[in-house]
């Protein structure tokens, strides 16, 4: 489907939810790499329309069931510092609809807020930590097994090695700038990729409900950029490890140059990490068990390594998962994550001290 067809289909799908009698204005929204997202406007009312990427998510209906369940749970709890989108329903009462290709579409309330380009100060970093903490606290009493696994193996880091190895073997041997170095970076760090999985399998760290993708782009702030209002992009809300979420949030927020930075300027900013983790610890108050705290540094290092591995694999496979606007982009992004990993490794002592101060 080209962009014009997509926009036309979007308009038809939005109509099915019958949320307004008049005409709907539809425009692309956000910078997501997986789903297609639109803002829908009718007079002063706004919604978010999404086509769920069926290549990535095997069970879109399961995603929607999770969202309904969680929305009800949060409403029951009366959580005030976390806004959750309302799901629009079709006249038949469904929270989703399918187009002719079988793709699933949904319409949700628009949460008036916007993602930050980057964290500007300690106040914003703390706001992020509090929001993620509020989410983890709010779902702590939900049995994770009662929710659908929407993306099997999502943060099972060692699971990414097999497709990576296959793609590396099959990749055309034409030399590409930066590829050798990226492959070598992974080769030097294969050991220990299963550290969290081992602990999970041994029952040392609990499985809980996670967001799965709490990067800065998936957090909405108010207009002044002071208050963090909502977590969005909720398709990977599923059973997982809380450490994955913290690691993912930090790899995104503390890399202030962003995922497409110039490699030479990539750094893990302790001035963001410190207030973020402190606020998270304050908001969650003893949620993490000691076995999680002792593995927190490992998680902070592991998640950018995993994402780099995923970008690199996708590059080798011909960009099938992460949307790119130019060839080579996924390789460049992999190298940026690896540069971040290297900086995290360099600053291990300082990061450990921050962890000890926040959770000690
Ligand atoms: C993808 O859809 P989006 O852009 O929020 C990806 C995450 C990555 C992120 C990197 C389902 O998230 O795992 O961390 O890109 N989501 C999926 O920007 O693969
Ligand atoms: Mg996402």
Image (cartoon, rainbow, N blue to C red):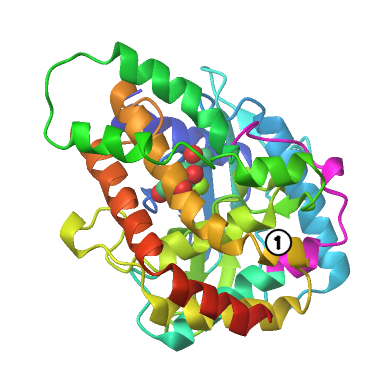
Can residue 115 be spotted in the picture? no
Q: Residue at position x 48%, y 28% from top?
A: 161
**Disc 1 residue crowd, few under 14, some 14–19, many 20+, Cα 10 Å:** many
Q: Is residue 318 left or right of residue 10?
A: left
Q: Residue at position x 86%, y 42% from top?
A: 146
Q: Which residues are magenta?
A: 135-154
- Depth check: 4 or 19 in front? 4
> Magenta segment, principal secondary structure?
loop
> In the rendered view of the protein, which quadrant contains the C terminus?
bottom right
- Depth check: 217 or 185 in front? 185
Q: Is residue 161 left or right of residue 230?
A: left
Q: Quadrant of residue 319?
A: top left
- Depth check: 58 or 174 in front? 174
Percent across and percent down for residue 182 are: 26, 38
- Depth check: 284 or 74 in front? 284
Q: Which residue is mark 1?
A: 292
Residue 145 lies in the magenta-colored region:
yes
Percent across and percent down for residue 250 are: 48, 65
Residue 247 lies, with reference to residue 270, above or below; the image says above
């Amino acid at each position: 489907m080209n962009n014009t067809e997509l926009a036309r289909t979007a308009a038809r799908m939005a109509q099915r939810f019958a949320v307004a009698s008049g005409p709907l204005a539809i425009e692309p929204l956000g910078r997501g790499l997986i789903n297609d997202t639109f803002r829908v406007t009718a007079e002063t009312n706004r919604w978010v329309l999404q086509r769920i990427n069926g290549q990535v998510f095997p069970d879109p209906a399961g995603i929607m069931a999770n969202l309904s369940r969680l929305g009800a749970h949060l409403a029951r709890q009366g959580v005030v510092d976390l806004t959750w989108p309302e799901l629009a329903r079709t006249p038949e009462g469904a929270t989703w609809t399918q187009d002719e290709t079988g793709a699933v579409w949904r319409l949700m309330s628009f949460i008036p807020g916007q993602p930050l380009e980057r964290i500007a100060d300690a106040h914003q970093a703390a706001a992020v930590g509090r929001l993620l903490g509020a989410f983890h606290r709010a779902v702590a009493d939900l049995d994770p097994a009662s929710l659908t696994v929407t993306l099997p193996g999502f943060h099972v880091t060692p699971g990414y090695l097999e497709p990576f190895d296959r793609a590396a073997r099959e990749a055309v041997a034409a030399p590409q700038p930066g590829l050798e170095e990226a492959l070598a970076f992974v080769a030097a760090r294969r050991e220990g990729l299963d550290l969290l999985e081992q602990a999970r399998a041994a029952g040392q760290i609990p499985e809980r409900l996670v967001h799965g993708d709490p990067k800065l782009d998936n957090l909405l702030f108010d207009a002044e950029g002071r208050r963090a209002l909502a977590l969005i992009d909720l398709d990977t809300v599923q059973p997982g490890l809380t450490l994955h979420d913290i690691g993912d949030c930090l790899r995104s927020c503390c890399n202030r140059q962003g995922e497409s930075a110039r490699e030479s300027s990539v750094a893990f900013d302790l001035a963001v990490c410190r207030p973020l983790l402190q606020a998270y610890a304050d908001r969650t108050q003893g949620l993490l068990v000691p076995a999680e705290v002792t593995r927190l540094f490992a998680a902070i290092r592991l998640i950018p390594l995993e994402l780099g591995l995923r970008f690199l694999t996708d590059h080798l496979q011909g960009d099938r998962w992460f949307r790119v606007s130019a060839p080579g982009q996924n390789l460049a992004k992999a190298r940026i994550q690896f540069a971040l990993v290297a900086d995290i490794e360099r600053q291990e002592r300082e990061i450990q001290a921050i962890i000890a101060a926040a959770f000690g």
